[in-house]
Amino acid sequence: MDNEEVKNEAVVEQNESKQEDAKKEGISFESQSELDRFMDKRLSKAIETARSKWEEEAKEREDKAKKLARMTEADRIKAEQAERDKELSKREQELKRLEYSIQAKSTLTEAGLPNDDELVSLILSDDVETTNNNINYLKGVIADSVNKRVDELSKQKTPNASSTKLSGAVSIAELAQKNRVIK
């Protein structure tokens, strides 16, 4: 294949990819130009979002650098230490949360409950005791709900007094009296 064919194949693959993306969103296009305009708009929006995010980060870095430049050496060292402490604290919290998550999954499994991530995120808190209380509460709520449903399904209607006699039939006492050999 020559360069021209490779380029044509690349363009065809891009167009097919664009069309598949549009189909996933439930959008159909009458022509290739409509699809191209749609994709250009999407790309422009994505680029603009990325650019604004980058500009914000650059502005923050610049402000931080200016602030550090105005500080004395001792203040700068204190600020950098505070920044490191803040990052370390944040990482510690993330590790604790991960540990709590693993413990919560284990506790849910022991309790016979599903341990998927959505359920864990609902019951997870910042300390083990609260997480365990949440699990116990969930376990109780589920048990109560199951018991109520079982009770509803197992209830039978009690027969009333008129249902002991069939319509047009005689009562058991009358049958016994009638069939008695010794009177």
Image: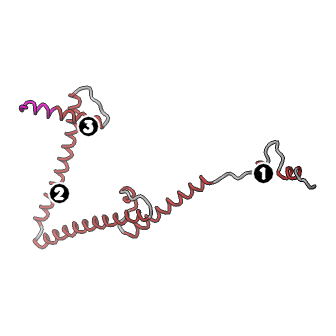
Instruction: Locate residue 183, reporting x and y percent.
Output: 93, 55
Name the residue located 20 percent from the left edge and 39 percent from the top edge. Answer: 43
Depth check: 80 or 70 in front?
Answer: 80
Name the residue located 37 percent from the left edge and 55 percent from the top edge. Answer: 118
Q: Amino acid at mark 1?
A: Ala
**Is disc 1 surrounded by few (<14), some (14 to 19) or many (20+) residues within 10 Å?**
few
Which span is picked out in magenta? 1-11
Q: Secondary structure at mark 1?
A: helix
* Front tag of 1 and 2: 1
Depth check: 103 or 70 in front?
Answer: 103
**Is disc 2 surrounded by few (<14), some (14 to 19) or many (20+) residues within 10 Å?**
few
Q: Which mark is residue 60?
A: 2
Instruction: Locate residue 96, reporting x and y percent.
Output: 30, 67
**Residue assigned mark 3:** 21
Instruction: Locate residue 169, reporting x and y percent.
Output: 82, 44
Marks 1 and 2 sit apart, C-alpha to C-alpha, by 84 Å
Instruction: Locate residue 83, reporting x and y percent.
Output: 19, 67
Q: Amino acid at mark 2?
A: Glu
Marks 2 and 3 sit apart, C-alpha to C-alpha, by 35 Å
Do the residues under discs 2 and 3 have CB atoms within 8 angstroms? no
